[in-house]
Amino acid sequence: MRKTGLALLAMALLGLGFFGYSRYTNSGSENITVGILSDAAYYAEIKGKSAVGIEPVILEEIVTLINKDIEISNKGITENKSKTELVSDVKLENKTTKEVPCHTNCKTKCISKQKKIKYESYNSIESLTQAVKSNKIAIGAGALTIRKSEDVRFSNGFEKVNQVILTNIKSNLNSLISLKGKKIGTQLGSTCESFIKNEIAIKKLEIAVTSTPDITTLVEMLKENKIDAIIIDNTLAKDIISKIGNIFVMFDIKESKTEEYGFMLSKEINLDDFNKKLSEVLIKQKSKDLKSTNSTKTSEKTINTKK
């Protein structure tokens, strides 16, 4: 099982102001702590092939951009070090230079270290939300649908999703009406849970709903026929079918509305700065995908021409 998560961005990121502290600081951790839902990571082992699988790729790219800004800022500081108060020696880019002590209210430019991602695994949306809310971690990831919350904020979206019915391959449960009198499962605290409960109330359907903190439990229950279907995001459903094999099938729900996955952010993170970096990464990723598609088409055309 591939564990993923984003680490706590130390005090303030140099030159970015990701956190609400000083713009330049050398205090705090070098890590950015990211928490990710463990079962979401489990069903997305094909890196880059799903929303969950692509999240670590996006985050790594964001940190790369952060580190480039840090490198540029640090270079500017070392070139103008005569203008700062020199109090101690540090090594930067194989050169000996100086730095000044920093604290949360410091306005003096200081040397900042390169950032690395530290991953932590969480087994429920609730525990992940609490970790972000308490600033234990900076960022939450793992197929998190953007929604209104008083506790945490969400980044801009990076992947569109909608709810589907995941059921056994021989089943004909292909609509909400067909679920009448059945037992279904959904993830506790998810938008899928609120969606299905709302639809049940509107349509007055007699459907027994079981909500569990993790999707893995739901999948095992479906395997053992303890429930008849799972209401889940289409992206995760595809990941499950890919990993488990063709024992499950998914059906679109016409009442479902398109939503988006985003990153859960602690209130210490500068939302605008994060979204700016996220936008840069997504544009870069889209460009890569386009080049890859064009390359594949060119190769296929060459093969067909030779034939």
Image (cartoon, rainbow, N blue to C red):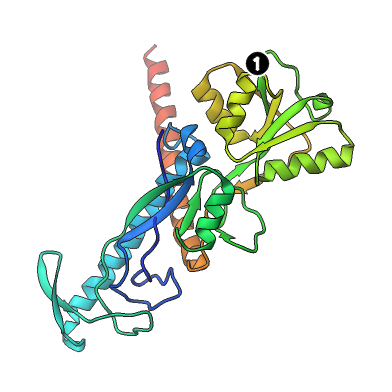
- Of residues 41 and 291, the one drawn nearer to the viewer in this rendering: 41
Question: x, y percentage for residue 110?
Answer: 26, 77
**Image mark count:** 1
Question: x, y percentage for residue 247?
Answer: 59, 16
Residue 301, quarter of the rendered image: top left
Q: Does residue 262 appear anywhere in the picture?
A: no
Left or right of residue 121: residue 70: left
Identify the residue at horizontal 21%, vertical 72% (top origin).
Answer: 75
Question: x, y percentage for residue 259?
Answer: 66, 46
- Of residues 194 and 94, the one drawn nearer to the viewer in this rendering: 194
Left or right of residue 75: residue 292: right
Identify the residue at horizontal 55%, vertical 31% (top origin).
Answer: 216
- Of residues 301 and 197, the one drawn nearer to the viewer in this rendering: 197
Q: Quadrant of the C terminus?
A: top left
- The residue carrying pointer 1 sits among few (fewer than 14), some (14 to 19) or many (20 or more) residues within 10 Å by Cα, namely few
Identify the residue at horizontal 53%, vertical 30% (top origin).
Answer: 239
Helix or strand or loop: what does disc 1 sit on? Answer: loop
Identify the residue at horizontal 63%, vertical 25% (top origin).
Answer: 221
Q: Taking 4 as reference, is 263 above or below it?
A: below
Left or right of residue 75: residue 149: right
Q: Quadrant of the N terminus?
A: top left
Residue 15, quarter of the rendered image: bottom left
Question: x, y percentage for residue 150?
Answer: 65, 64
Left or right of residue 141: residue 119: left
Q: Taking 247 as reference, is 24 above or below it?
A: below
Residue carrying label 1: 169
